[in-house]
Image (spheres, helix red, strand yellow):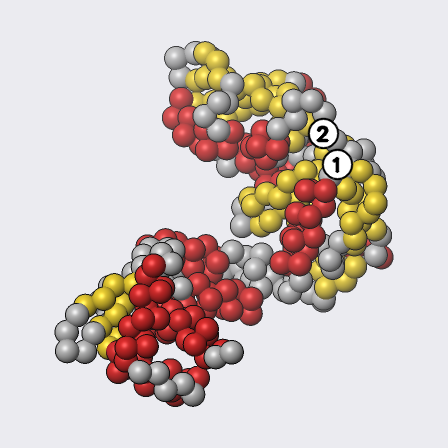
Amino acid sequence: MDIDAKLRPLYLLQILQERTDEDNYLTTAQLASILKQRYGMEPHRTTIKGDIEVLQQAGFGIDERRSTQNQYRYLEREFEIAELKTIIDAIASSKFIPEEKSDALIKKVTALAGIYKARDLKRNVVVDGRGKLENKQIFYIIDTINEAINQHKKIRFRKIEYNVKKERVLHHGGEKYTFSPYSLVWDGDNYYVVGYSDKYENIGSHRVDRIAEQPEILDEPAVLPKAGFSVEKYVKTTFRMYNAPRKEVELLCDNGVMDAIIDQFGPDVHTYAGDLQNFRVIEEVAVGKVFFNWIFGFEGKVRIKAPADVKVQYRQMVENAAKVL
């Protein structure tokens, strides 16, 4: 069996994908030279032409320009350059991807464009300076959580936190959490898993990068969400995914902040007439310090109208903050 004859079309495809694009061709002689240098093959020019015709018949986007030396280029790439730039920006900006893994992913994505277009993918994206996270198992953790979601199984894991010396230590001495994962959510530059917590007997979330190691998938069915539960709705009404008691809250909002309200709650937010200067919002939200910080940031243009106990909580938080000025 002539194994080289079987491998040669695959090698030619790889070479054309790497070294040609809409602006750059390789001649038959150049292809033969690369095959010899890289793989130790010495094909005839007619052999190369036949191999490329096989690839073309198989549906690969290889264009031929006929001349004394036929020239070939690879077209119809999976991604456009603009799409690859967007993917690279997302990888570079993603805080949950460790720097070493981020660099490796960007190299792989850049290779999809070929060597000539790779320089066009040099990005100048500015990351906010908070730095990449250190959990190098992140992709294995995500993969295990996805597997558990698909199998409708519970997972068990430990969490990590930072002590005053900025050292990574196990949360609560290595306490194990049992959790029914429903969905993975990317919110505020962090990755979260949303689901049902056995410990708190309620819906909650955990930051994926704070999971210490690859979770254990239990041979135990997940606790299913109640009828009508929507992960999308949960995310919109949980500020920065901070777990807190959920209550229906009525807000009185200045007419000028509608954009911000829609950005937070989505276009289907429940709004009602207020007065000439204000409108009302009624939503169930996670009532906690992150929600109150969000309210405070509007400098009075968003006010808590009801319920009374939430108004009291907010007032106490503001008063406690003022005492330390």
Residue 220: percent from left, percent from top? 83, 41
Front residue of 102/49: it is 49
Q: Which amino acid does label 2 sit on?
A: Pro
Q: Is residue 108 above or below residue 151?
A: below
Q: Is residue 262 left or right of residue 296?
A: left
Q: Is residue 289 above or below residue 58?
A: above
* Disc 2 + disc 1, Cβ < 8 Å: yes
| Residue name at image x 69 percent, y 42 percent | 149
Q: In which quarter of the image is residue 195?
A: top right
Q: Residues within 10 Å of mark 2 (few under 14, many from 20)?
A: some
Q: In this view, does 34 lie to the left or right of 109?
A: left
Counting residues from the start of the chain, the first of labels 2 and 1 encountered is 1
Q: In which quarter of the image is residue 98?
A: bottom right
The residue under the point 46% across, 74% down is: 7
Foreground of the two, 34 or 256: 34
What residue is shown with label 1?
196
User: What residue is pinned by disc 2?
Assistant: 225
Q: Residue furthest front?
A: 1
Q: Position of residue 55 (x, y in %)?
A: 36, 64
Residue plotted at (72% across, 66% down):
167
Callout 1: SS? strand
Q: Is mark 2 on a helix, strand or loop?
A: loop
Give the x, y percent position of residue 267. Answer: 45, 25
Task: Give the residue displayed 62% in from the left and 44% down from the top.
Answer: 184
Q: Label 1: few (<14), some or many (≥20) within 10 Å? A: many
